[in-house]
Image: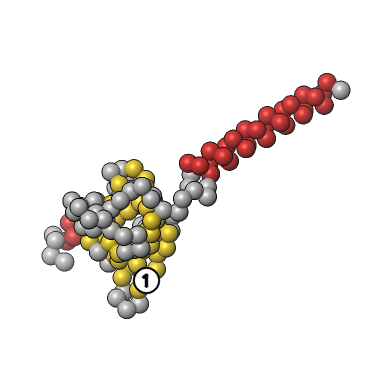
Amino acid sequence: MAENVAEVVTGTAVLAVAVGFLTYASQFGGFGGGGDGAQYTASFRSAEGVSVGTDVRLAGVKVGTVTALELDPATYRASAALTVDDEVLLPDDTAIIIASEGLLGGSFVEILPGGSPFNLEPGSEIEDTQSSVSVVQLLLKFVSGGNE
């Protein structure tokens, strides 16, 4: 009988740890049903390294995610939809760039807020964008002498 009690206690402890982990992951991992945030769009010449779920950061802090990425057939540009936390108000002269975490790191979308006293309305487009820089293209320019 003592073996059954030990098994029940161990099983309960394992279930409690699993529930705690799932609760933590849902709150801090972006899986929870928290606020959806404000939606914005941006158009990039190249969105290399960015996909749905890529972090959107402001001052190095994650404030949102990329929710959609598709090709605009009329302009041949990558159209991205971004969700940003509701408490983050973006000035209407905000810029957005695709940055790299390092030479071999992944990419993320960085928000550079402007100084305008007027804020962007949720659902509007961030027009000042800078596309990703391809390390391979930079190396090719360096090797070829920069004539290309």
100 or 119, nearer to the observer: 119
Q: Say left or right for 121 vs 32.
A: left
Quarter of the rendering containing residue 79: bottom left
- Image point (53%, 44%), residue name: 26
128 or 142, nearer to the observer: 128
- Image point (65%, 33%), residue name: 16
Q: Position of residue 72 (x, y in %)?
A: 35, 73
What SS does tag 1 mark? strand
Looking at the image, residue 16 lies above or below residue 57 = above
Q: Position of residue 142 (x, y in %)?
A: 17, 56
Position of the C terminus by quadrant: bottom left
Which color scheme is applied?
secondary structure
Q: Residue furthest right?
A: 1
- Image point (38%, 59%), residue name: 39
- Image point (43%, 59%), residue name: 67
Q: Say left or right for 29 vs 83.
A: right
Q: Residue furthest top?
A: 2
Quarter of the rendering containing residue 47: bottom left
Report if residue 103 is visible in the image. yes
Q: Amino acid at mark 1?
A: Leu
105 or 73, nearer to the observer: 73
Position of the N terminus by quadrant: top right
Looking at the image, residue 6 lies above or below residue 137 = above
Q: Position of residue 17 (x, y in %)?
A: 62, 33
Task: Give the residue number, with chain letter if any, for mark 1.
Answer: 71
- Image label count: 1
